[in-house]
Amino acid sequence: MSKNVTWIILILGVCAIYTSCKKTEYLGVGFYNVENLFDTIDDPRTFDGEYLPDSFRQWNTDRYFNKLNQLAKVITSFENEKTPDFLGLCEVENRLVIEDLLKTDALKDKGYEIVHYESSDVRGIDVAGIYKPSKLTLIESGKQWVNLSEYGEITRDILWVKMKSNDGSIFYFLVNHWPSRRGGLAESEPKRMIAATALKMLKDSLLELEPTANLVVMGDFNDEPDNKSILETLGTSGDANKISNTQLFNAMSALNDAQKGSYCFRGTWNMLDQIMINDQLLDNKSWEYTRNSAKIMDYDWLKQQDGNYKGFPLRTFGGKNYLAGYSDHFPVSVVLQYQQ
């Protein structure tokens, strides 16, 4: 056997061993608008009277704990029954309701920890994040104010969370809940433009300090991927192959183009809940977005099974009627991966 053939066999053997030793790590990332997760205790600082035992909703302990267990069931069904490693939440009243959620039978052994700040929203609803410390280490966190003072209104802050993965990579997770469409889509759009500007400034400032950080933006934006606030003001694209270092790739754009949605309004599906990433998660160097992993969790058991709203998300209340469901939004998720 010639020396050249021997070297080729040796090199192929080493490559085979190296390939077999490579290990792929995954991060499951999700977002869920849990729709009015209120406790049963009156908070005199907010307008939470709709969700108290003596209200027309009769929001009592049984209904509260049923809601918690229903949400926990959803969270444990992410990505083929794997709970997400980071999950953004919105419409939570306070830290207590998140703690109660994590105490449910389905989630109590998952090891989640909480990132949460109180916002000044008049109804008392906040954004938050839960994460697995076995996968992500919290470095620091904070909140970004969205200034709607010109409208005489207060909205939810943007939560930002700086974390480190087990391989030492830096991640930023930014959790949003933008102003609603109340009053009409066009009439309320300027408020979401303000939120988009605040988010862009936050994103740019974080990446200016750490240009190589992996950045994941998520939330209920109350706008869709092709609305001006997201497409132009924030600066996004639905083409993963054409992302500049100032843009975000919107992982939900393809689903929106296919007329899918996470929320249904008057029979029309809207892609309000979205997850976006920066170019660092598309450069084939370390952590990567798993292509085509963007998903709307629209399982049949999460839908209303009959009546005028058949196929809609099965929510806790339909008007004043108690339905004992989950939320009026479907959760969304993506998968990130890294080969060690």
Image (spheres, grey):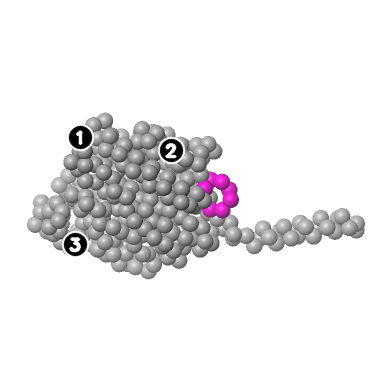
Q: Position of residue 18 (x, y in %)?
A: 68, 60
What amino acid is labelled 1 in the image?
Answer: Gly
Q: Position of residue 124 (x, y in %)?
A: 20, 53
Residue marked by disc 1: 183
Confirm or deny contact between disc 3 and disc 1 (CB under 8 A).
Answer: no
Look at the image and say whether residue 284 sits in the magenta stretch.
yes
- Of the 4 image quadrants, the one containing the C terminus is bottom right
Q: Position of residue 289 (x, y in %)?
A: 51, 48
- Camera-near label (2 vs 3) is 2
Quadrant hosting residue 102: bottom left
Question: What secondary structure characterizes most of the magenta part?
Answer: loop
- SS for callout 1: loop
Query: Is 339 situated left or right of 263 in this image?
Result: right
Residue extent of the magenta highlight: 280-287
What amino acid is labelled 2 in the image?
Answer: Thr
Residue marked by disc 2: 236
Q: Position of residue 15 (x, y in %)?
A: 72, 57
| Rendered residue at 39%/56% (across/down) | 161
Confirm or deny contact between disc 2 and disc 1 (CB under 8 A).
Answer: no
